[in-house]
Amino acid sequence: LSARELRLGPAPLVGGRRRAASVYINRGALPSRISSRKMAGSAKSFYDFATKQLITEEPLQLSQFKGKVVLLENVMNELQSRYGDQGLVVLGFPCNQFGHQENGNKEEILNSLKYVRPGGGFVPTFSLTEKVEVNGKGAHPLFIYLKEMLPFPSDDPQSLMTDPKFIVWSPVCRNDISWNFEKFLIGPDGVPFKRYSRKFLTIDIEEDIKKLLKLVK
């Protein structure tokens, strides 16, 4: 079975058809908001995207993770330590659109992880990227792609941010990420496999990770 066949049914449709997006590829600068959306039909997989590393600001081409299982989550050292040598990669994407929880600079983000949330001297063993927007007109194209491939969390299809005081982006879409700690799991073929709500415990994704790791060559 492929990662796609392991899905619980086919990928959801958006507007009657599957759509995708592409991030800037081999380019030095971020794309404009218009070009980010314009590129949304060209990506074939997760590997067509790029971002930057948090501290060094060096380009991070996601194609380097071909053949790996990739989990997008902000604070999960345990799974990275347990399955990293089997082919799991954990990527954290800081975002300041939810209660302004990530309003610091790159050094302050690391200090926040270490002393505040989760605290206790936490030091990430996974890769952290530059701060990005995930909703609205400034959304990073990777998240445009992920939301269109997986329009809602598998464990909570009705998940929405309904409190207007917390909605700081525009336009608002049905497939928006509702809060920090939503998670995306990518198969070793680069196809988004499943989306999980912020209430779904990251450690409980372990069974899905083990299924996908069986496909790693």
Image (cartoon, rainbow, N blue to C red):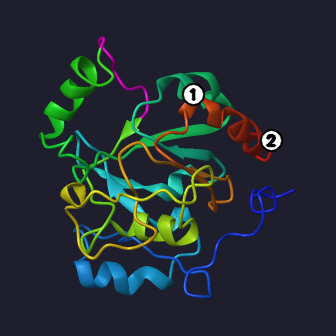
Q: Secondary structure at mark 1?
A: helix
Residue drawn at point x = 23 percent, y = 61 percent? 164
Residue underneath mark 2: 214
Q: What's the magenta bit mostly, secondary-structure-wise? A: loop
184 in relation to 47, above or below: above
Lower sequence index among marks 1 and 2: 1
Of badges 1 and 2, the one in the foreground is 1
Number of other residues with Cα within 10 Å of mark 1, as a class: few under 14, some 14 to 19, many 20 or more: some
Residue 61 image position (x, y, % from top left): 42, 57
Foreground pick, 171 / 60: 171
| 88 relative to 182 in the view: left or right | right
Identify the amino acid type marked 1.
Leu
User: Quick one: which residue is furthest to the front in this view?
Assistant: 163
Q: Quadrant of the N terminus?
A: bottom right
Q: Amino acid at mark 2?
A: Lys
Residues shaded magenta: 120-126
- State the SS at label 2: loop
> Looking at the rendered structure, which numbered label has been put on residue 79?
1
Q: Give the image location of residue 77, x and y in percent.
A: 47, 25
Mark 1 to mark 2: distance in Å? 16 Å
Residue that appears at 40% across and 83% down: 39
Looking at the rendering, which quadrant does residue 9 occupy?
Answer: bottom right
Residue 135: image location, x then y, percent: 32, 65
Q: Residue at x 39, y 70 (%)?
A: 23
On screen, residue 121 above or below 190: above
